[in-house]
C-alpha cells in the first residue's frame, strides 16, 4: 500500500486493515470483480474503496473513474461524508449526483467531472444523456454497487444492469458489489460476471426486546438516553411527524422521510 494512502487512512482513524479489508484489497488490486459480503459495520465500504484509492493515486486521469451506486440518496450522502476526508488528503475529487442535486452543481459536474461520482441507479441512467458526462464515463475503471441485495431481482436492478451493459460499450472497468444480507452470493457473483466472493464474519449478535408501556414517550426517552444514537421506525409519515413533535419536548430529535425538503433530510442525517 502506498505511504500516502496509509497516512490518509490513519488521519481518519484506520490504523490497520481488518482481515476482510486485507482480503478484499488483494482481490480488487489484482483486477478481479468482487462481491464483498459482511455484516453492517464491518468496514465493507472501506474494503472496496481502499484498493480503489490505491489505483487512483498510482495513475491520474481525467473524467469519472469511479461510479459508486447506492439505492438511496441518504446512503449517497453518508458515503460522501465517510470518504471525502480520505479523498481530500489524496487530492482525489469526489461528489454526489442524485435527485436532490441542485442544477448549479449538475452544471459544475458536467464541466469538470469528479474522479469519484456517488449516485443512484436512476441518476446513473441519466448520465448517458449529456454529451460531456457520457464522454467522461469513458474513463470509468470501477463500478461499485452498494446494498446490491436491494437491487437484485427488482425492476430497479434490471435497469441498473442495463445501464452497466451500456457502460461496457464505452469503458473497461471492474465491478465491486457490497451486501450484508445477500441470500445467494453465488447467484449474485454470476450476475457480476463471476465475481470473487470475499466474505466476512457473518455471525453478529443482536439483542431484541419487546417492551410494553402505557407511557411510550417516556420509554422511548429512556432508551434514547442510554445510547449514543437511536433510530425510531414508525409506519407512516404522519406518525413520524406527530412523534417528532412530542419527542422534541423531551430530547433532541429529528424527523426523516421522503416528503421532507432536501435541506431537512440532510439536517436530520447529520
Image (cartoon, rainbow, N blue to C red):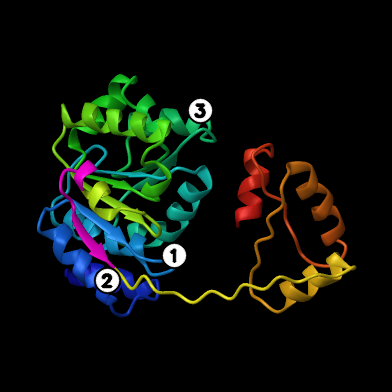
Question: Which label's residue is closer to the chain start, 3 or 2?
Answer: 2
How many numbered marks have been drawn onto this rendered protein structure?
3
Mark 1 is surrounded, within 10 Å at the Cα level, by few (under 14), some (14 to 19) or many (20 or more) other residues, namely: few
Which mark, by number, is residue 18? none
Cα distance in 3D space between marks 3 and 2: 39 Å
State left or right for residue 38 relative to residue 270.
Answer: left
Tell me residue 120's x, y (percent). Answer: 42, 38
Report if the CB atoms under discs 1 and 3 are less than 8 Å apart: no
Which mark, by number, is residue 40? 1
Tell me residue 228's x, y (percent). Answer: 64, 74
Question: Which label's residue is closer to the chain start, 2 or 1?
Answer: 2
Report if the CB atoms under discs 3 and 2 are less than 8 Å apart: no
Q: Nearer the viewer, residue 40 or 225?
A: 40
Residue 210: quarter of image: bottom right
Cα distance in 3D space between marks 1 and 3: 33 Å
State left or right for residue 256 relative to residue 49.
Answer: right
Query: Which residue, given by chain and number where applicable, does mark 3 sit on?
Result: 103
Report if the CB atoms under discs 2 and 1 are less than 8 Å apart: no
Q: Is residue 83 above or below residue 222?
A: above
- Residue at the image point whose x is 75% and y is 71% from the top: 211
For residue 196: magenta? yes
Mark 2 is surrounded, within 10 Å at the Cα level, by few (under 14), some (14 to 19) or many (20 or more) other residues, namely: many
Q: Does dot 3 land on a helix, a strand or a loop?
A: helix
Quadrant assignment for the C terminus: bottom right
Q: Nearer the viewer, residue 184 or 204?
A: 184
Q: Does dot 1 land on a helix, a strand or a loop?
A: loop
Residue 58: quarter of image: bottom left
State left or right for residue 20 relative to residue 171.
Answer: right
Span highlighted in magenta in the image: 190-199
Q: Nearer the viewer, residue 2 or 247?
A: 247
Q: Is residue 164 above or below residue 2?
A: above
Amino acid at each position: 500500500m502506498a505511504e500516502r494512502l496509509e497516512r490518509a487512512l490513519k488521519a481518519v482513524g484506520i490504523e490497520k486493515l481488518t482481515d476482510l479489508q486485507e482480503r478484499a484489497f488483494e482481490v480488487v488490486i489484482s483486477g478481479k470483480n468482487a462481491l464483498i459480503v459482511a455484516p453492517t459495520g464491518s468496514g465493507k465500504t472501506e474494503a472496496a474503496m481502499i484498493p480503489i484509492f490505491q489505483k487512483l493515486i498510482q495513475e491520474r486521469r481525467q473524467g469519472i473513474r469511479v461510479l459508486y451506486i447506492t439505492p438511496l440518496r441518504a446512503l449517497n450522502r453518508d458515503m460522501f461524508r465517510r470518504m471525502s476526508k480520505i479523498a481530500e488528503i489524496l487530492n482525489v475529487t469526489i461528489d454526489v449526483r442524485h435527485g436532490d442535486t441542485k442544477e448549479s452543481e449538475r452544471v459544475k459536474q458536467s464541466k469538470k467531472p469528479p474522479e469519484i461520482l456517488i449516485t443512484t441507479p436512476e441518476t446513473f441512467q441519466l448520465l448517458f444523456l449529456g454529451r460531456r458526462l457520457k464522454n467522461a464515463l469513458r474513463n470509468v475503471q470501477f463500478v461499485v454497487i452498494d446494498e446490491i441485495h436491494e437491487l437484485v431481482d427488482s425492476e430497479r436492478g434490471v435497469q441498473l444492469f442495463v445501464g452497466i451493459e451500456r457502460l461496457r460499450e464505452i469503458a473497461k472497468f471492474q465491478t465491486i458489489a457490497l451486501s450484508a444480507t445477500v441470500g445467494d452470493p453465488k447467484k449474485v457473483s454470476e450476475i457480476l460476471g463471476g465475481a470473487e466472493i470475499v466474505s466476512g464474519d457473518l455471525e453478529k449478535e443482536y439483542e431484541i426486546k419487546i417492551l410494553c408501556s402505557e407511557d411510550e414517550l417516556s420509554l422511548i426517552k429512556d432508551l434514547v438516553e442510554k445510547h449514543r444514537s437511536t433510530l425510531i421506525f414508525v409506519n407512516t409519515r404522519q406518525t413520524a411527524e406527530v412523534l417528532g413533535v412530542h419527542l422534541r419536548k423531551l430530547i433532541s430529535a429529528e424527523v426523516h422521510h421522503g416528503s421532507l425538503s432536501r435541506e431537512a433530510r440532510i439536517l436530520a442525517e447529520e
